[in-house]
Structures are given as structure tokens and as C-alpha cells.
Image (tube, rainbow, N blue to C red):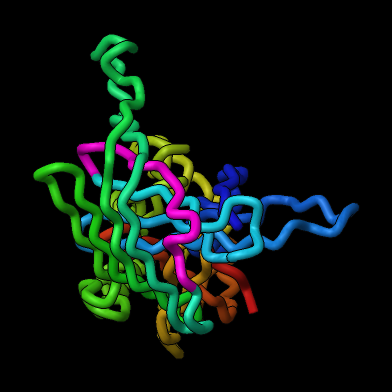
Amino acid sequence: MQLSGMRPTFSRIAILVALALVTIGLAARDVSAAPTPSREMTFIEQETGLALILQVEPFARNPGAFVFRVPGRGLYEGSVGTAMRVVSPQSIVIDFTGPAVLRPPVDPGQPVAAQRAVPVTVRLQAQVDPSHREAEAKLRDGESSFQLNTHRRAGQGIPADTLRAFETALVASDWTSLYALSNRDLRSAYTAQTFASQAEAEALRVGRVLSVGRLSVSDVLSDDSGARWVVVGYSVRTRAPSGVITETRYDAFFIAELRDWKVWYTVAR
């Protein structure tokens, strides 16, 4: 399962008078035929960006297929095959030595020939817990070794400082700070200047936030794609250009992006 970002109209994402900064949709699925069993899971170490993508379903077409991402080095791709042992719903053990390919990071400044995948021999050892979406894995390529451990993520929840910065920026109409707190999909869709100018125009048209009251903060949630998020409940008072004051409740979703937490999207209750 893969999450894909969608680029919404700016009126939907400009400011928190609508509390809608971005929307995320699930890729459509073809349900016309019985699907082949599949469960491709992604495990990301938040501090380093190391990641393991693994087909954990033993009856899939490609059981044990893996991609091991090493930032700055590239993607190791291969399949452990029968070296993957499903012990229980909470335990998959891998001890594999064999062929893989290394795909270096794309670099427009380098010749295409220098960026081709190269064959390598790797050793991959892993202990995976599909039920709790946790993993420890070590990949060795010659003298190089890379160790992933999702259990040592930096903090298990969203920092209070991040929430305070978000709330303060909303009340102050501080579009520069809101832009910096937004997720990478929004930042790739808009420059900081465009975001600020359109957000200010939207505030003049719709109204401004007077106060933001935090009602609740959820535990960290996750899915098989490796996404981790927190849902924060808010009560938001806004004043329209006519002077009318309204109060609305929203759920704001914050998503983990490596070491940081960013605004993902929001919905009115």
C-alpha cells in the first residue's frame, strides 16, 4: 500500500481558517479480480533515514523481496527468498547472504553510465515484527555495514514545542512559520513567498484566527507504508471580515518526516 500526495487548490490549504493545508489520498485499487496476497511493509529509522522495504507475505508472488535504503549511497534491491522465516505474526527472521543490486542516488551532474545499478553480494540479517510495525536489520556490503533499528526512534510523540509553534503561527498569521511547519508535499507545490501572499489574501477574504485551543493529542499511529502520524484536536475561533466570530473544532494531522513533525492535513469535525 502506498500513500500518494495530491496537490489541492490553494483556497483549501491556505490558512487554518479552514485548517486545511494538504490532502492525502490512497491509491485506487483494482477490485475486479481476487488480489494476490501481498503485504509490503516499510520500516524507517527516523534519525538516520535508513529504511527497509520488505514483502512479508510468504504467499506473495515475490516473498522476501527487499529494498534497503542508505541515504547518500543508494538502494540495495534483492530477494531473500527462503531465507525469510515467518515464525509468528510478531516475528519474521531473515539471515540471507546472496546477490543484490545497488542503485546509486540519481545525480543530474553525473554521467548516466556512472549511475547504473551494479551487482553486489550482501548479507542481510533482520528481525521484523509486522504486528507492531517494528524492525531491526543489518546489511553488510563488503567492508561497509548499515544497521537499522526502528525501536530507537527519536521520541515517540510529537514535541510540545512543535505544537506551540504551530498554534502561535496561526494566531499571528505568521505564514513564513506555517510554511516551514508544513509537510514536504506542500513545500514542493508552493514557494514560501507564494504561500504567504496567497494565505494573506485568503485571510482578508475569509477572516483571521483569533484563538486556538488544544483539546487532545493522540498516540503515534502508523501504517504499512512507514508513515507515522499524530492527530491533535483543536477548537478554533475565527473572526470574519464582517465581524462575526465563529468557533469550529478541527483535527490536525501531523506526520513524521525523519527528525521533524510536519502538518500533514486537517479536517473539520
Residue 9 seen by the camera = yes
Q: Residue furthest bottom?
A: 215
Q: Is residue 82 magenta?
A: yes
Asked if the magenta segment contains residue 100, the reply would be no
Q: Is residue 70 above or below residue 46?
A: above
The answer to whether any part of residue 161 appears in the image is no
Could you tell me residue 61's position as x and y percent? Answer: 65, 52
Query: Percent from the top left, x then y, of residue 77?
Result: 40, 42
Question: Residue 70 or 83: which is nearer the viewer?
Answer: 83
Which residue does the image show at 31% across and 76% down from the upper left? 158
Q: Nearer the viewer, residue 78 or 83?
A: 83
Residue at position x 34%, y 40% from top?
Answer: 75
Which quadrant would residue 211 be assigned to in this image?
bottom left
On screen, residue 115 versus residue 21, left or right, reads left
Q: Quadrant of the C terminus?
A: bottom right
Find the magenta span and give its range: 71-85
